[in-house]
């Protein structure tokens, strides 16, 4: 079972689930969620449920295990928000006007997006190891943040020199990078971003909206 968007793979799981969920209420919602979970588990996926008190039945994430090139068992998953899970790493898109960084206190501005990011969102990496999910930061430890346009330029060694990084050293591996690339391209397509290069771009630093 692949992860790409050309088949029913991991990245498609919540898109499929969410498209039908509005049609189910009450007991029907429970039956639908349970049926979806059973189908995904039958294909080798694992379902993580929301266990918050007072919350309705909800699937928080779909994950699976696979072996990397070295034979090590790794976990890859997708959350209900569309974030990518890679072992204890969580990768999410930060859209214009969103918050990112330590404490989620920084605003991602349209001006930064226009000048540096070619009108694409940013990609934030967080360490979700249990030790870093305690109050007051249940969202995990901030590791690094890149413009999506920088990550999409695979010829640039941006992984070795993050635009923003935490004080604690952090390095990714080839297995994580492969999934980040596939996930990022799929998410940008699904949300309607025009991220592929245009023949008229030339050497400009950004594209104005009328060029799209």
Image (spheres, grey):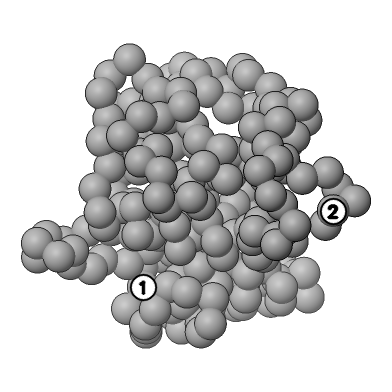
The CA distance from mark 1 to mark 2 is 42 Å
Left or right side of 46 for 193: right
80 above or below 11?
A: above
- For the N terminus, the quadrant is bottom left
- Name which residue lies at 69% across and 22% down: 107
Query: Residue 196: horizontal and vertical position, in percent?
Result: 64, 61
Q: Please determine whether, in this image, residue 103 is positioned above or below residue 202.
A: above
Q: Position of residue 199 (x, y in %)?
A: 70, 62
Measured as percent of width and height from the top left, residue 43 is found at 37, 83
Whether residue 204 sits left or right of residue 154 in the image: it is: right
The residue at the point 46 percent across, 83 percent down is 39
Mark 2 element type = helix
Residue in the foreground of this view, choosing between 203 and 180: 203
Does residue 131 lie above or below 22 as drawn?
A: above
Q: What crowding class fits label 2: few (fewer than 14 Cα within 10 Å), some (14-19), or many (20 or more)?
A: few
Residue 160: give x, y in percent of width and height.
31, 34
Contact, mark 1 vs mark 2 (Cβ under 8 Å): no
Identify residue for label 1: 45
Q: Which mark is residue 98?
A: none
Residue at screen point 69% across, 49% down = 202
Residue 133 in view here: no
Q: Residues within 10 Å of mark 1 (few under 14, many from 20)?
A: many
Q: Residue at x 64, y 58 (%)?
A: 197
Horizontal side of residue 17 vs 72, given as left or right = right
Could you tell me if residue 202 is visible in this image?
A: yes
Residue found at the very far front of the displayed protein: 202
| Front in this rendered view, residue 76 or 135 | 76
Residue on which disc 2 sits:
211
For residue 58, what is the image quadrant? bottom right
Quick one: SS at disc 1? loop
Residue 161 left/right relative to 181: left
The one nearer the camera, 145 or 64, is 145
């Amino acid at each position: 079972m692949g992860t790409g968007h050309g088949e029913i793979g991991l990245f498609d799981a919540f898109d499929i689930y969410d498209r039908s969920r509005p049609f189910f209420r009450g007991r029907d919602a429970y039956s639908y969620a349970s049926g979806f979970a059973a189908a995904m588990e039958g294909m080798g996926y694992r379902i993580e449920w929301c266990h918050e008190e007072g919350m309705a039945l909800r699937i928080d994430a779909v994950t699976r295990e696979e072996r990397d090139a070295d034979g090590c068992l790794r976990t890859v998953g997708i959350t209900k928000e569309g974030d990518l899970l890679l072992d204890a790493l969580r990768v999410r898109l930060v859209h214009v006007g969103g918050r990112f960084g330590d404490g989620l206190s920084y605003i991602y501005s349209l001006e930064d997006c226009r000048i540096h990011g070619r009108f694409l969102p940013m990609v934030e990496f967080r360490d979700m190891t249990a030790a870093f999910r305690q109050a007051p930061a249940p969202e995990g430890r901030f590791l690094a943040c890149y413009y999506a346009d920088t990550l999409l330029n695979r010829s640039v060694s941006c992984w070795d020199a993050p635009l923003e990084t935490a004080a604690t050293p952090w390095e990714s591996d080839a297995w994580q990078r492969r999934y980040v690339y596939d996930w990022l391209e799929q998410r940008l397509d699904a949300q309607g971003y025009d991220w592929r290069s245009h023949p008229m771009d030339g050497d400009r630093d950004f594209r104005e909206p009328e060029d799209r």
